[in-house]
Structures are given as structure tokens and as C-alpha cells.
């Protein structure tokens, strides 16, 4: 059953029409007014070469865009008067989509993954934790390292610092800690940020076919021998000649 809160209603002579709200995920270029859709009477125009052309009427600006073979695109609707640019609308949409894509690439840096350790962690388990941290850092994510003490382990906090320092030494080619490890409450905490891509080592667990994941690529896999098919024995004898 559909929820009535997600619908808007329009009243007509024949009855009430219901329609769902339009989706909220639009690209920035979908709200841009172009040419005759611009509502202002006067606009501030930026030329094709990027120079200011001053404030002119909307009709003159549209005619100027037609003379240059481009569109009049409104880039700052809230300004007084609105700011418009002489540019090909298809090129403008491509630039906006490219900027939006580049901004999403940097959103990974705001994501934080946590790796938990213990003072008595096994060397093999520590290697697995290092592998996970390297994968996160190579995907431009921050890593929060937390080591927790239990019971009487608080009497030997130096062991915990040794484990943390050993862990940080393993991931030096991929990230640097934002601050030295700190003892907070019953644990040691430190935040590790990824290095820039041009200064960061390549992920040793990354393959060309599956970037960012740990898969083993098999070249020329062995072909199994053909399977022998066993036919059933005869259950009856052939009739005599």
C-alpha cells in the first residue's frame, strides 16, 4: 500500500489527481536556464573568451549569443542582475558533469574505516589487519587504529604502544598518522590519512583485472583430463543363433 505522504494532489473538475514527487537527485545542469527560458529583463554577460561584457538587455544578450553560434546560459540566478555566460550548452553540461565527478573522487577521504588491535594479537592476525588498512588507504580512505586493553593489561601499556608502532611502520608507504598515538581511557587511538597518489606506493594486493580487490590471477590454467564414461553392463544375454 502506498503512503499518502509521498504524494501531492491536484484538484480538477473531474476529481482529485495524485502524482508522486519528482526525484531529488538531479544534476546541476538540469536547473540551468538557457536562452529564452531566462526570466530576467537585464543580465550581466560573460563573453566567449571569459571577459565581462557588462549589463545588457536579455534580447540583446540572446542576439549576441546567436551571432557567436553559442547559447546564453544562466550561471548565477541569485545575483542582481543574473549572470549569464556565452557558451555552448552541451560543453557547459560536460564541464559541470566533470566537476561533479571530480568532487566525488575526493569524498572517499572523508570516509573513515576502523581497525581494532589488541596487545596480545597474533603476528598472522596483525598481518591481516595491515592488509586491510593498506586496502583502505589505497582507496583514499582514512583509517582509525584502536587498541583496547582488558583487565590487567593496563599495567603494561608499553606493550600496546609497541604493537601500534609496529603497525604504523608497516603502512608507512601508504599513509601517515595525523598525530602520535594517544592513550585515551583503556585504549590507544591514532588516525592515519592516505598519502597523495603520486607519493603513495602501489597496492600489492591489486591486480589489473580487479582493481582495489585481492584476487589471484591464473594465467593458462591447467586443463583437466577428459572424464572416462563407464557404460553399464548388459543385464540380459543375447538370444542364441
Image (cartoon, rainbow, N blue to C red):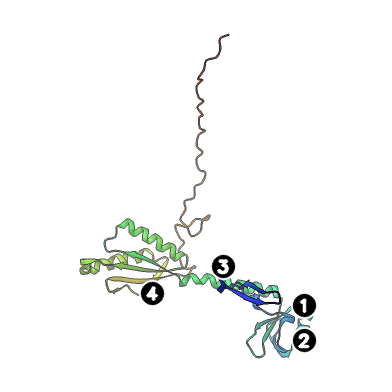
Label 1 neighbour load within 10 Å: few <14, some 14-19, many 20+: few
CA distance for labels 4 and 3: 49 Å
Report x, y in % for residue 84: 68, 84
- Helix, strand or loop at label 3? It is loop
Quadrant of the snapshot with the C terminus: top right
Give the mark nearer the N terminus: 2 vs 4: 2
| Residue under label 3 | 2
The circle on residue 178 is 4
Label 2 neighbour load within 10 Å: few <14, some 14-19, many 20+: some
- Which of discs 3 and 1 lies nearer the camera? The answer is 3
- Helix, strand or loop at label 2? It is helix
Label 3 with label 2: CB-CB less than 8 Å: no
The circle on residue 59 is 2
CA distance for labels 2 and 1: 15 Å
Give the mark nearer the N terminus: 4 vs 1: 1
Label 4 with label 3: CB-CB less than 8 Å: no
| Residue under label 1 | 69
Give the mark nearer the N terminus: 3 vs 1: 3
Amino acid at each position: 500500500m502506498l503512503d499518502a505522504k509521498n504524494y501531492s494532489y491536484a484538484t480538477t473538475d473531474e476529481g482529485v489527481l495524485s502524482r508522486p514527487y519528482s526525484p531529488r537527485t538531479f544534476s546541476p545542469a538540469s536547473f540551468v536556464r538557457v536562452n529564452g527560458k531566462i526570466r530576467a529583463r537585464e543580465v550581466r554577460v560573460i563573453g566567449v573568451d571569459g571577459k565581462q561584457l557588462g549589463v545588457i538587455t536579455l534580447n540583446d544578450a540572446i542576439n549576441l549569443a546567436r551571432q557567436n553560434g553559442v547559447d546564453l546560459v544562466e550561471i548565477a540566478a541569485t545575483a542582481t542582475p543574473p549572470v549569464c555566460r556565452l557558451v555552448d550548452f552541451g560543453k557547459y553540461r560536460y564541464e559541470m558533469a566533470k566537476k561533479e565527478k571530480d568532487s566525488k573522487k575526493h569524498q572517499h577521504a572523508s570516509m573513515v574505516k576502523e581497525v581494532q588491535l589488541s596487545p596480545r594479537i597474533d603476528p598472522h592476525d596483525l598481518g591481516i589487519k595491515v592488509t586491510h588498512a593498506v586496502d583502505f588507504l589505497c582507496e583514499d580512505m582514512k583509517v582509525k587504529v584502536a587498541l583496547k586493553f582488558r583487565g590487567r593489561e593496563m599495567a603494561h601499556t608499553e606493550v600496546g604502544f609497541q604493537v601500534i608502532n609496529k603497525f604504523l611502520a608497516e603502512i608507512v608507504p601508504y599513509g601517515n598518522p595525523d598525530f602520535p598515538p594517544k592513550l585515551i581511557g583503556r585504549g590507544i587511538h591514532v588516525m592515519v590519512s592516505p598519502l597523495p597518489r603520486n607519493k603513495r606506493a602501489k597496492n600489492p594486493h591489486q591486480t589489473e583485472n580487479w582493481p582495489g580487490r585481492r584476487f589471484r590471477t591464473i594465467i593458462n590454467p591447467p586443463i583437466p583430463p577428459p572424464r572416462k564414461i563407464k557404460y553399464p553392463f548388459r543385464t540380459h544375454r543375447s538370444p542364441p543363433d
